[in-house]
Each structure stands twice: as C-alpha cells, then as structure tokens.
Image: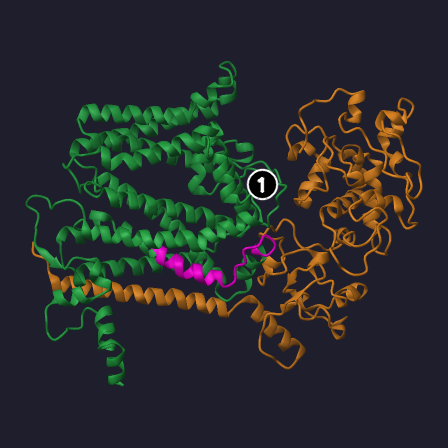
C-alpha cells in the first residue's frame, strides 16, 4: 500500500487544530473558574446588602498576634462592624459578639481562638483544620473555651467555666496518674499517652477515648469512664474542653496574657494557682482512686521523692516514679502493652 | 533597518525565520537544505522509514517523557516565584500557592500530574527499549537513558519533600531511613543528602537545590546527549521487516508533526486532569507524631514493602540487583536477532509470557502463605535470622533466576533469559507496590473494600 503523503499531512493538521482547540477550551475553563471564585461573590453580596460604595474586589489579609496570616475578613466583612450588631444579616456577615470584639480590635485575629485554615479562601477549606480535615471544624461554643487557655489561666477570666470544670474533673478522676501532663516541664510520662504531645486529636477521638478507649487503640489498658459520664453528659463536654486546651499551643507573643508562676509550659501551675496566684495541692488528692485507697497508701507509695515544702519557691511538684507505674505496686499490669 | 541587522550578523531576521520554520523556502532549493539549516529539525534525519511513523514501533514514550519534562520545567519555574524553602515558611507558601495565588492550584496540579506522567512514561520507555533489544549497538545511549531515569527518580523524590506537609515529611523520613540498611556507604549518603541525621532545614534546602538546579541541569545535559545519540546511532533500532514497504518518507511533516501532535495532546490531557483534580496538600508537619501507616511515595512503595520483610533486602539487595542487571544488559546480550521487535523472537515472546504468568501465580502464593497466615508464627520456630533469608523478596529473586535459567536453556537466547527475569521482577514489584498501597495502620494488610480502624 502506498503512503498517501497529502492525506497524512491533512490528518496531522486536523489533529493539531483539534488539540489546540481543546487546549484553549481547558485553559478558558480554568481561567473562568479562577475569575469566579467564591469570595468574589461573597464580597459582591456584602456590598449589595450594606449599600457600601463598591470598591474593587480584593483579598483582605492580616497577620494575627500569633504571626499567622489570615484571610478570613475577605468574606467576613461584617465581623468588626458595630453598626451591624443586632441587624439580621446572613451568618457570614454577622458582627462578632460584643464581649470578644475587644480581642479582635487588639489584633488577636480569628484563628487564634477559632482555629481553621486562615490562609484559605474557599469556605470549606478555611473552616477546616489545615489539610482539609473537616472532622475538626472551627471551634464554637463551648469548645472555644479551650482556646482561652492559650493566653489565660483557667478561671482567671470570665467565660472559662467549662474549662475550669473540666480541669477539676480531670484531677478528680485521677487522669493525672497516667497522664501527668509533663509536670514541671519534664519529659513525657511513660505510662499513658502524653496529652500535651503535639499532634492534634479530633474531638470524636477524644470522646471515644473516654468512653471506650479500646475502640481507638486495641489492647488499651485505660479504664472506661462511660458510667461516670452517663449520669452527667455535661461533664463529658467539660473534660473535652480541657483536653482540647492541652493540645492547643500557647499563643506566642499575643498581648494581654496572664502571668504564669512557674513558666509558660507548666499546666500544674495553671490549676494550682487558680485565681489566687498561689500554689497549693488541694486538687490532686480529690482523685477518686487515692481517696478509695487512702487507708492502704502512704504518700511515698506514689511519690518516692521528697515532697517539697509548699509555698513559693518550693521546688518541683511531687513526682511519681516514672520507672514504676504506681498502680503496678499493687495491681498486676500488662507490661509491654503501652497505650499510645 | 535592514542595514542594522546586516551589520549585526548577516541577515538576522531571515536566519531566525529559517531556523524556526522549515517551510520557508530558501531561494527555491530542496527540503534537504531547509532541514539542514533548521534548529528544531536537526534532530531528525531528512527521510525516515514508514516503520518510524507507526505508533506501535515506540508508542511515542520518549516524546511523552520529554513533553512532561518541558511542562515540569515551565510550571516549576512558575512555582518557584512563590515557594520558600524554609521549614517555617514552606508550608505557608504552599498554602498561598494553593489558595490565594491566581491559577496557583492549577499550576501546582499540572506540575504534580506531569511528574507522575513522566515517572510512568520513563519506566514504560525503558521497558520498550529493553523488550525490543533496542540497546544493541547503543550501549552508551542505554547508559545515558539509565542516568536520565535516575534523574527522574531523584527529581520526584526531592520534589516530594518540598510541600513540607505531614505526608511529604514522613515519606522522606521513611525513605531516608531505608539508607541505614545500605552497607558501608548508607550512613554517609544519608548524612550528605540530609545535611545531618534528621530531616530538617538543611535537608529541605538541599532537596530544593537538587530539585530546581542540579538535577534539572543534569537532566537537560543528558537529554541533549540522549537525543543526539539516537541520530548518531542511526535513528530507531531495528531493520524493516522483510517484505515491508521500505519506501522512505520525508521527516517533515510526517514525523515532526506527529511528534508535535503527541506533545500537544499530552499537554491537553494533563491540563484537563490538573483542572479537574488538584494536587493534595496535607496537614502541616508534626515531627513528633507520624501518621499511621506512614508510607514512602508510591513509586518507592515496593521498596518499603520489601523493607517490611527485610530491611537490607528491600533497601539495598534488590535495588542493587535491578540496577546491576539493567546496566549489564547491553553488554551481556550480544544477539542481533529480533532487534526492534516487541520481545524479540516468537520463542522469546512465549518465555516472557510464561514468566509473567508464573510471577503472578507466585505472588499470589507468597502472599497467601506469608501475609495472610502471618509471618510471625512461621518464623518464630526458625529463629530471628530467617526472615531476612526466607521471605517474598528473596522468593522473587529465586523466581527471577529460575525464570531466566529456564528461558535461557529453552530458547538458547541470553535476551530471552534476561527479559524473563526482568519481567518476573517487574510483575512482582508491581504486586508489592499494590500490596504496599493496601497496607493500613501498623502495616497490616487490608483489602481496598475493608475499612481501616481509626488510629488518629
């Protein structure tokens, strides 16, 4: 068969033309999509609603006090508008509640308290934690109280009731025995997961850990607190607020932070200090296990080191022997199986 | 004006025009003189065989790879405008590219999918050349091609770290730790690559340097040599079949436009995919908490799966064997029969087919006994040294050797032996990649339709 040169050339040219057309189509589609982003529509809607003089649509961004770039106000144009308070507007344009507006005006920004991905302009992505994890949505009430602990001591300010209640339950239930929260800034405890370790857990995971730990981690030796919370579901929320506060980092150089007595990273001081600003051991021995066992136990069973004198400058907190999980003194534990 | 150009270097506009557009006649002379003067078309001979135009001859895989490289160069330069190679800034700059920069997510997606296209097309190109014995008499270009393949893997690997998200950080950490199993030099290579013992700022900067400067420059140089050698070696390997139309056709437009067509459509398809599917950006790096499971990039998954059987085997023995086999191939195979034909002679074709089927069957058997029954119980009785010696990875080596021996004896051809061994290795490595992809938390195997238990 002879090769038809002219026909082949024609077919190649048609193929090239078709390819060029398709490429144009794809690029046109990409360009159009880029020009019709969600935030442009939102801004247009805001100017229609308020009757403000329209200016060119633009991305609005600012750094919050933790140094993170945020673009939230690109869409949430009404957040700082006092004249919109009490006015019926779509949720996205609502003014921030009056009580916290001062924070906003001092440069706290949005993500410092609410979390989310401030750099994103797509509402779905912006309202999720980085990486688009939607199971950790923006923090609202009551969980947003966890963010207060980034700057404030529990109970030091108004509006932190649930955080304080959660901390008290944490101590009362004896969580501190296995999860000592890096007391005194020491390394992580060997027995239970270090709850202050970086690596955010989802709310659902934390809830499940309290109710059915083995569901999250097969072979977990942690007891279930299902019965305790069955009577009082509100207290479960309180503990979750407290646990969430442990995972959120301290907020760098934000202004107006409460002074901590033994250093920024010492959660003991946060609770023992309370509003009074003095260390005291009053919470620790509310722990149900210790109360139950108090006739059998001496202090040294759990605290083999010398307990320091109470009061300012009293040295380290009493430390539980890390080499020997205290429960193992009496109870056989499954050595080698370490939750987390 | 014309005088100015003449003073500058002869007839500059005319030179430019002729250099880029071969269709412009130069004083009414022949196509030959046009082509000889042109820059773009010096890559091709003036006349080519009909076989060179047929899709089934090469599948155009080299052109696809080259197109992907060009797309990657352009999109890569665009990404460099915003990307910042610092541990504190890298992730934030990726977020900016992804979320705020106009068309940023499209360019990033195009870069990512073009990279994957290049990985696949380069592998297929290598297989095409090997299966046709097209390295015969072209030993140098085969080695240059292997160097290009190494550059492609290096580029993919270094690029994987740059987003500095959880996935990329841990994938590189996993891969870097595999080097610990390489005897003698592993530790030195690792510390040279990372600029220390862990993946940190100096590692990120080195990976960035490799990704945007050293490897692309090396690649560019090798591509030039690769293309030049094809011409020097006389075009595509293999003589026309007997009785085949040996009529010679002009390269312009039949070959050149075909290549342009392929390049254009590769671009169209990749652009369409990039417009539809954006490249993933995971959660920010957390150097304390790895995800579970933590996986190497997909093109190194086979190595990770093998490492999970035995660290020295997966990280060193099998990659070294593969490399040695590929480097040695053109020097050991001295046969001229069947060059330029898919899998050479009919006997060779049969040997390869049987080897592939045997490899699939063996893969199934290994995995049923080893994975599902649980290797732990099996090896407890044998002692701790045995898992390094008896596992699916060593099974693969034995299988490949057996296939090579059988095929070699049955056909009397070195090439058939080599190809059979290679096919066994490739089929099983593909299998290990798929198995690795199915690994869930704690490296436990789950079928794709089984859910993973929650571990986060």
Q: Position of residue A312 (x, y in %)?
A: 92, 44
- Magenta run includes residue A336: no
Which chain is home to disc 1? B
Output the letter for the chain in green: B
Q: Main secondary structure of the magenta part?
A: helix
The part of the chain drawn in magenta is B68-90
Quadrant assignment for the N terminus of chain B: bottom left
Position of A277 relative to A28 (above/below):
above
Q: Position of residue A20 (x, y in %)?
A: 31, 66
Tell whether A227 sits left or right of B251. Answer: right
Q: Position of residue B343 (x, y in %)?
A: 21, 37
Residue positioned 12% across, 62% down in the render? A5
Rendered hue of chain A is orange
**Residue annotated with mark 1:** B291
Within 10 Å of the Cα at label 1, are there few (<14), some (14-19), or many (20+) other Cα atoms? Answer: some
- Magenta run includes residue B89: yes
Tell whether B280 sits left or right of B138. Answer: right
Tell whether A22 sits left or right of B238. Answer: right
Quadrant assignment for the C terminus of chain B: top right
- Marks counted in the figure total 1
Q: Position of residue B308 (x, y in %)?
A: 49, 30
* Whether residue B453 is visible: yes
Work out whether residue A37 or residue B207 is closer to the camera in this orientation and state it: B207
Residue positioned 47% across, 26% down in the render? B371
Position of B60 relative to B35 (above/below):
above
Work out whether residue B243 or residue A220 is closer to the camera in this orientation and state it: B243
Determine the image quadrant of residue B143: top left
């Amino acid at each position: 068969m002879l090769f038809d040169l002219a026909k082949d050339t024609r077919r190649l040219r048609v193929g090239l033309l078709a390819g060029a057309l398709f490429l144009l189509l794809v690029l046109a589609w990409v360009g159009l999509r880029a020009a019709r982003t969600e935030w442009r529509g939102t801004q247009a809607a805001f100017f229609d609603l308020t009757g403000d003089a329209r200016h060119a649509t633009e991305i609005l961004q600012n750094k919050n006090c933790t140094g993170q770039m945020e673009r939230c106000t690109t869409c949430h144009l009404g957040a700082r508008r006092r004249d919109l308070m009490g006015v019926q507007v779509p949720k996205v344009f609502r003014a921030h509640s009056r009580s916290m507006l001062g924070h906003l005006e001092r440069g706290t920004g949005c993500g410092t308290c609410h979390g989310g991905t401030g750099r994103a302009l797509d509402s779905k992505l912006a309202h999720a934690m980085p990486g688009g994890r939607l199971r950790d949505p923006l923090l609202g009430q009551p969980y947003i109280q966890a963010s207060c602990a980034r700057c404030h001591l529990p109970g030091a300010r108004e509006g932190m009731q649930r955080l304080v209640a959660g901390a008290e339950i944490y101590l009362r239930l004896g969580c501190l025995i296995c999860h000592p929260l890096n007391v005194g800034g020491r390394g992580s405890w060997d027995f239970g997961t270090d709850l202050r370790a970086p690596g955010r857990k989802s709310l659902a995971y934390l809830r499940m850990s309290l109710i059915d730990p083995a569901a999250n981690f097969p072979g977990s030796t942690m007891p279930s607190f299902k019965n305790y919370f069955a009577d009082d579901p509100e207290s479960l929320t309180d503990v979750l607020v407290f646990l969430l506060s442990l995972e959120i980092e301290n907020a760098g150089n934000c202004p107006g932070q409460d002074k901590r007595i033994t250093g920024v990273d010492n959660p003991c001081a946060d609770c023992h200090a309370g509003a009074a600003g003095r260390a005291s051991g009053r919470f620790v021995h509310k722990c149900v296990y210790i109360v139950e066992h108090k006739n059998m136990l001496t202090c040294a069973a759990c605290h083999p080191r010398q307990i320091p004198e109470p009061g300012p400058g009293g040295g380290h907190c009493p430390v539980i022997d890390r080499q020997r999980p205290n429960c193992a003194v009496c109870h056989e534990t499954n050595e080698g199986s370490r939750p987390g | 004006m014309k005088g100015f150009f003449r003073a500058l270097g002869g007839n500059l506009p005319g030179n430019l025009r002729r250099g880029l557009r071969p269709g412009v006649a130069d004083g009414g002379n022949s196509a030959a003189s046009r082509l000889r003067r042109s820059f773009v078309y010096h890559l091709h001979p003036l006349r080519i065989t009909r076989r060179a135009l047929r899709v089934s001859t090469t599948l155009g895989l080299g052109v696809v790879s080259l197109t992907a490289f060009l797309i990657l160069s352009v999109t890569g330069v665009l990404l460099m405008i915003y990307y910042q190679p610092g541990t504190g800034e890298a992730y934030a700059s990726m977020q900016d590219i992804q979320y705020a920069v106009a068309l940023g997510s499209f360019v990033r997606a195009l870069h990512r999918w073009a990279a994957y296209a290049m990985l696949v097309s380069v592998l297929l190109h290598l297989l095409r050349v090997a299966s046709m014995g097209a390295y015969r008499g072209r030993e140098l270009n085969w080695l240059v091609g292997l160097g290009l393949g190494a550059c492609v893997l290096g580029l993919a690997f270094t690029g994987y770290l740059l987003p500095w998200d959880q996935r990329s950080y841990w994938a590189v950490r996993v891969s870097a730790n595999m080097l610990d199993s390489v005897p003698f030099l592993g530790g030195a290579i690792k510390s040279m690559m990372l600029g220390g013992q862990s993946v940190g700022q100096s590692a990120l900067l080195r990976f960035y340097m490799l990704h945007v400067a050293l490897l692309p420059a090396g690649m560019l140089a090798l591509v030039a040599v690769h293309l030049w050698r094809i011409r020097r070696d006389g075009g595509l390997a293999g003589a026309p079949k007997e009785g085949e139309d040996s009529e010679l056709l002009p390269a312009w437009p039949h070959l050149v436009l075909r290549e342009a067509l392929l390049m254009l459509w590769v671009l169209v398809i990749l652009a369409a995919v990039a417009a539809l599917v954006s490249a993933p950006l995971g959660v920010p790096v957390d150097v304390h908490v790895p995800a579970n499971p933590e996986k190497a990039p997909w093109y190194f998954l086979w190595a990770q799966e093998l490492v999970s059987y035995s660290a020295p085997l997966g990280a060193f023995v099998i990659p070294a064997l593969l490399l040695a086999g590929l480097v040695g191939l053109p020097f050991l195979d001295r046969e001229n029969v069947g060059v330029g034909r898919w899998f050479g002679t009919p006997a060779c074709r049969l040997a390869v087919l049987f080897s592939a089927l045997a490899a699939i069957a063996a893969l199934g058997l290994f995995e049923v006994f080893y994975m599902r029954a649980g290797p732990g119980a099996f090896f407890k009785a044998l002692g701790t040294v045995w898992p390094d010696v008896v596992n699916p990875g060593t099974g693969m080596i034995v299988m490949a050797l057996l296939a090579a021996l059988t095929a070699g004896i049955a056909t009397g051809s070195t090439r058939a032996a080599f190809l059979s061994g290679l096919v066994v290795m490739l089929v099983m490595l593909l299998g290990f990649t798929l198995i690795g992809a199915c690994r869930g938390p704690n490296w436990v195997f789950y079928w794709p339709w089984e859910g993973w238990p929650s571990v986060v």
